[in-house]
Amino acid sequence: MAAIVEAAGATFADVVSLRVFLTDRHHFAAMNQAYADFVVERCGTAVFPARTTLVCGLPREEVLVETDALAVVAEP
């Protein structure tokens, strides 16, 4: 995800919102730990982006989790 944000000309500090889509609510604890590790590594003690987590079906059965991010950057 960080590579995609950076390719768009932003940094993880520009991310204001993250959405996480899970296929099984029983994966929430593991996802929550991985999410915390990922965000703390990139944000340190700064303000974390808002997060929404949804349990839903995804287009491909083998996909267990999907995420998207919204980053806000100033115009050049």
Image: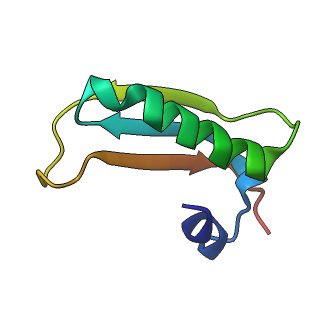
> In the visual, does 1 lie left or right of 22?
right
Up the image or down, 6 lies above or below 32; here it is below
Rendering coords of residue 3 (x, y %) = 59, 71
Rendering quarter of residue 1? bottom right
Query: In screen coordinates, is 54 left or right of 16?
Result: left
Q: Give how far across and how far down residue 62 sits, in percent.
A: 16, 55
**Quarter of the rendering occupied by the C terminus:** bottom right
Q: Position of residue 18 (x, y in %)?
A: 54, 39
| Up/down of 4 relative to 70, above or below | below
Along the viewing direction, whichever of 54 and 75 lies nearer the viewer: 54
Residue furthest to the right in view is 45
Residue plotted at (52% across, 31% down): 32
Q: Residue drawn 66% across and 43% down?
A: 37
Question: Quick check: can you spot residue 17?
Answer: no
Horizontal arrangement in the rendering, residue 24 relative to residue 8 (left or right): left
Near-viewer residue (71 or 53): 53
The residue under the point 56% across, 35% down is 33
Q: Image height check: is 50 above or below 21? A: above
Task: Give the number of callouts.
Answer: 0
The residue at the far bottom in this view is 7
**59 or 73, which lies in front?**
59
Q: State how the image is colored.
A: rainbow
Question: Residue at 26% of width from left, 46% of height from top?
Answer: 64
One can see residue 1 in this view: yes
The answer to which image quadrant residue 60 occupies is bottom left
The quarter holding residue 65 reads: top left
